[in-house]
Image: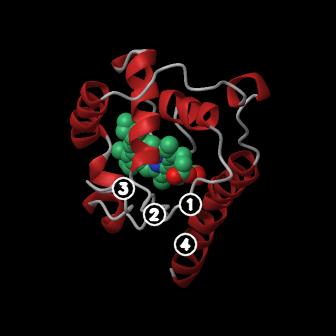
Amino acid sequence: MLKCVVILPAFFLLGAVPFLMRGSSATPQAAAFKVPPDAASKVNPVKPTPEGLAHAKKMWGYDCAMCHGANGDGKGDMAVESKFTMKDYQDPAALKDMTDGELFYIIQKGKGDNMPPEGDRAKPDDIWNMVSLVRSFAKK
Ligand code: HEC
């Protein structure tokens, strides 16, 4: 009887090993994320207008603020609760090394497990307006 008590948990522990290994192999994949060079070099073709930015702000409120914060500080409820690592877009240094094309690509296609893609929900012009909006959060 005592043997059962020892052996059964051992089986469960061994059974968990493949799952644990699968979990750890996902990390290098995420680190390899890269925006294709042709997408990264795209220049924002949509001039920011008050109307375009207002529309982007509305979509931001629905789709983005819960993580990135209403004002882009990265302190949205969901991001805080889930302990996501977020950039503070109010800091002008936060996005200085990223091109508009990279921001567009990430908004459209998503990134990693936590940044969801807009996909077909937003037209390309709407996404370019979101790129302008994201840039506009930086404090001068
Ligand atoms: C569920 C939380 C969540 C939502 C919703 C979300 N994001 Fe993100 N976003 C993230 C996280 C986390 C990252 C960082 C991903 C990484 O670097 O691995 C990110 C990254 C980004 C980036 C790349 C720059 C950076 O901060 O690293 C942009 C641009 C962006 N998000 C814009 C948006 C826009 C626009 C929306 C709404 C359409 C949105 N996000 C919705 C969590 C979210």
* Residue 59 located left or right of residue 3: left
State the residue in front, 53 or 40: 53
> Please, what is the three-letter code of the amino acid marked with disc 2?
Asp
Q: Which mark is residue 9?
A: 4
Q: Nearer the viewer, mark 4 or mark 3?
A: 3
* Residue 30 located left or right of residue 140: right
Q: Residues within 10 Å of mark 3 (few under 14, many from 20)?
A: many
State the residue in front, 37 or 137: 137
* Location of residue 48 with respect to 8 vertically, above or below: above
Q: Position of residue 73 (x, y in %)?
A: 37, 62
- Tell whether circle 1 marks a residue whose Cβ is less than 8 angstroms from ligand 1: yes
Residue 27 seen anywhere in this rendered image of the structure: yes
State the residue in front, 86 or 96: 96
Q: CA distance from mark 1 to mark 3?
A: 11 Å
Q: Which residue is mark 3?
A: 72
Q: Who comes first in sequence, dot 1 or dot 4?
A: 4
In terms of image quadrants, where is residue 79?
bottom left
Q: Position of residue 105 (x, y in %)?
A: 58, 30
> Please, what is the three-letter code of the amino acid marked with disc 4?
Pro
> Please, what is the three-letter code of the amino acid marked with disc 1?
Ala
Q: Position of residue 93 (x, y in %)?
A: 59, 63
Q: Residue at x 28, y 49 (%)?
A: 65
Q: Nearer the viewer, mark 1 or mark 4?
A: 1
Q: Look at the numbered discs 2 and 3 and tell me whether their residues touch, using CB distance below 8 Å.
A: yes
Q: CA distance from mark 1 to mark 4?
A: 48 Å
* Residue 104 located left or right of residue 116: right
Q: Who comes first in sequence, dot 1 or dot 3?
A: 3
* Residue 132 located left or right of residue 28: left
